[in-house]
Amino acid sequence: MQIDHDLILKLENLAKLELSEAERERLGKDLGNILQMVEKLKELDTSNVEPLTYISDAVNMLRDDKIRGQVTNELALSNAPEKNEPYFKVPKVIN
């Protein structure tokens, strides 16, 4: 894959970024270096390497969900500057 100015502009647009010309140059060089590294990795013989499902042997120690420390509606709303029972009243942010 060739990293050219058009590709950088397309990526900039997709990522909703506004880059300077110097940043575009640096990004092009960085992406080129990443692609060179991937090409170098393709040279390795991995035919005898088993694919990994997980990187580490750690196991999640999950706990049971328990309901505790509940607050009543009245207590939760007691310090609210504005309320519309049983809800907090907040300023409108979407037109």
Image (spheres, helix red, strand yellow):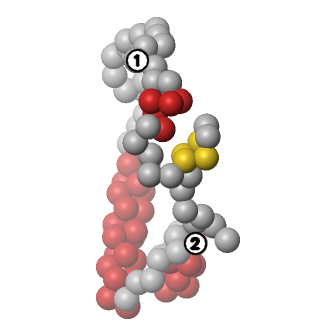
Callout 1–callout 2 Cβ contact below 8 Å: no
The type of residue carrying mark 2 is Leu
Asked whether, in this view, residue 20 is left or right of residue 93, the answer is left
Q: Position of residue 29 (x, y in %)?
A: 34, 76
- The mark tally for this picture is 2
Asked whether, in this view, residue 83 is left or right of residue 55, the answer is right
Q: Which residue appears at 47% of the width and 10% of the height? A: 66
Nearest to the eye among marks 1 and 2: give it: 1
Q: Which residue appears at 50% of the width and 24% of the height? A: 72
Quote the CA–CA distance across marks 1 and 2: 45 Å
Mark 1 = which residue? 69
* Residue 79 seen in the figure: yes
Asked whether, in this view, residue 56 is left or right of residue 35, the answer is left
Residue toward you, 63 or 5: 63
Q: Is residue 29 above or below residue 37?
A: below
**Is the residue marked by circle 1 packed among few (<14), some (14-19), or many (20+) residues within 10 Å?**
few
Q: Is residue 80 above or below residue 10?
A: above
The type of residue carrying mark 1 is Gly
Q: Position of residue 16 (x, y in %)?
A: 52, 75
Residue toward you, 40 or 17: 17
Mark 2 = which residue? 14
Extreme residue in the bottom direction: 21
Check disc 1 and report its element: helix, strand or loop. Answer: loop
* Residue 52 seen in the figure: no
Q: Which residue appears at 57% of the width and 72% of the height? A: 14
**Location of residue 24 by image quarter:** bottom left
**Location of residue 35 by image quarter:** bottom left
